[in-house]
């Protein structure tokens, strides 16, 4: 007969689940970390058990600019309020890139009803299968960039041209983002080529995990990526650019004991029905150069004067994608 009071039985069950499961005590020290939590985050249980998850590791990246004292973890909130909390977060994988998760946290109580800790379960935010989408079968091994693995420049340019024709024919607008790492030459001089390849990989992962499954990510040059954002006007395009900028800023690699990160400049433009590939590429290039000239770590939009003005006004009133999301930091204190 199955002994449900045997703690090893419950441990075996939790380890077999295809969701991440963790438990913290009242001091927010990690008491349990299951197998799938290791798979999702890259952190082994021996690296997290007994360590404290601090509130300042939950970094809001919306436009409210919360200070450290206002950053409250869902675990702490669940224990203080005695009720469940559900949040969407980006959790730093051990490799340095953010992974989008949905986290559900509940308070744990003893037989007297006192809160003694909190349990959390988390799953990666699932991608949306789009088997009939025109670009869903693209970029699966052909012309992949040897460093970051997104499609290389040739494939990306061909795909952009096909996408432009399709969008013009069916009156489906899309946006283009040119994303470049700021001062990559200085980074390479300071840390070497291997570190540059590692940080490019982290940025590529951040883009793939941080964007909608319908969006396309390709390599444009050594320090640049090109993103095609589906069904996107100027205001949403600006918001997506800001979202990407924040994701990259909160990504990092550990290199010889140091945490290295970069910022990006983002140029944005929306396609115009009937325009040429050359005009679209030239316009997004101007937007990118505007961000670089502005000192980097910013987003610039290029479009028709009235479109750009309207997009900027709308963006100032709207909340960026995932505005309620936070970044869950990778390190844990002893």
Image (cartoon, rainbow, N blue to C red):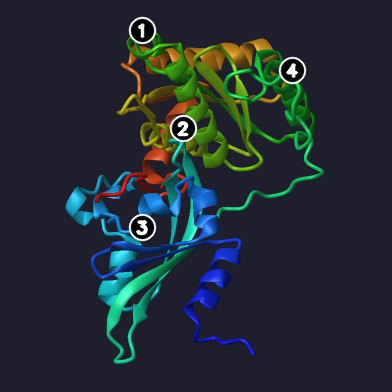
Whole-angstrom CA distance, mark 1 to mark 3, is 38 Å
Name the N-terminal-most of marks 1 and 2: 1
Whole-angstrom CA distance, mark 1 to mark 2, is 28 Å
Q: Residue at x 64, y 42 (%)?
A: 213
Whole-angstrom CA distance, mark 4 to mark 3, is 49 Å
Seen in the image, is 229 located left or right of residue 256?
right
**Residues packed near mark 3 inside 10 Å, few (<14), some (14 to 19) or many (20 plus):** some
**On the image, which quarter does residue 147 sit in?**
top right
Residue 200 percent coordinates (x, y): 49, 22
**Residues packed near mark 4 inside 10 Å, few (<14), some (14 to 19) or many (20 plus):** few
Of badges 1 and 2, nearer the viewer stands: 1
Residue 252 percent coordinates (x, y): 38, 32
Q: Judge whether residue 227 can be spotted in this image.
A: yes
Name the N-terminal-most of marks 1 and 3: 3
> Mark 2 touching mark 4, by CB under 8 A?
no
Q: Residue 241, which numbered label?
A: 2
* Callout 2: SS: helix
In the image, 216 versus 206, the foreground residue is: 206
Farthest-out residue, right: 132
Whole-angstrom CA distance, mark 4 to mark 1, is 33 Å
Q: Residue 49, which numbered label?
A: 3
Query: What residue does disc 4 label?
Result: 158
* Callout 3: SS: loop
* Callout 4: SS: helix
Name the N-terminal-most of marks 2 and 4: 4
Q: Judge whether residue 305 can be spotted in this image.
A: no
Name the N-terminal-most of marks 4 and 1: 4
Query: What residue does disc 1 label?
Result: 189
């Amino acid at each position: 007969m199955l002994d449900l009071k045997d703690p090893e039985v419950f441990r075996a069950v939790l380890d077999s689940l295809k969701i991440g499961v963790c438990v913290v005590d009242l001091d927010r020290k990690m008491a349990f970390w299951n197998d799938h939590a290791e798979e999702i985050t890259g952190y082994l249980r021996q690296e997290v058990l007994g360590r404290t998850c601090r509130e300042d590791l939950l970094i809001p990246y919306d436009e409210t600019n919360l200070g450290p004292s206002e950053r409250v973890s869902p675990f702490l909130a669940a224990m203080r309020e005695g009720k469940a909390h559900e949040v969407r977060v980006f959790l730093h994988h051990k490799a340095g890139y953010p992974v989008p998760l949905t986290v559900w946290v509940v308070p744990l109580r003893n037989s007297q009803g006192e809160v003694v800790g909190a349990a959390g379960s988390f799953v990666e935010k699932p991608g949306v299968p789009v088997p009939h989408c025109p670009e869903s079968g693209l970029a699966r091994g052909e012309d992949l960039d040897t460093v970051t693995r997104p499609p290389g420049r040739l494939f990306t340019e061909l795909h952009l041209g096909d996408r432009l024709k399709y969008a013009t024919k069916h009156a489906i607008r899309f946006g283009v983002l040119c994303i470049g790492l700021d001062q990559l030459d200085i980074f390479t001089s300071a840390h070497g080529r291997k570190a540059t390849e590692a940080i490019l990989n982290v940025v590529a992962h951040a883009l793939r995990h941080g964007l909608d499954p319908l969006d396309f990510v390709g390599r444009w040059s050594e320090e640049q990526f090109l993103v095609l954002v589906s069904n996107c006007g100027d205001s949403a395009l600006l918001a997506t650019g800001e979202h990407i900028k924040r994701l990259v800023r909160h990504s990092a690699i550990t290199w010889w004991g140091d945490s290295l990160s970069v910022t990006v400049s983002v140029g944005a433009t929306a396609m115009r029905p009937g325009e040429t590939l050359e005009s679209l590429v030239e316009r997004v290039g101007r937007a990118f150069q505007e961000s670089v000239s502005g000192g980097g770590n910013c987003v610039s939009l290029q479009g028709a004067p009235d479109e750009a003005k309207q997009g900027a006004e709308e963006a100032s009133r709207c909340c960026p994608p995932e505005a309620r999301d936070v970044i869950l930091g990778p390190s844990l204190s002893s």
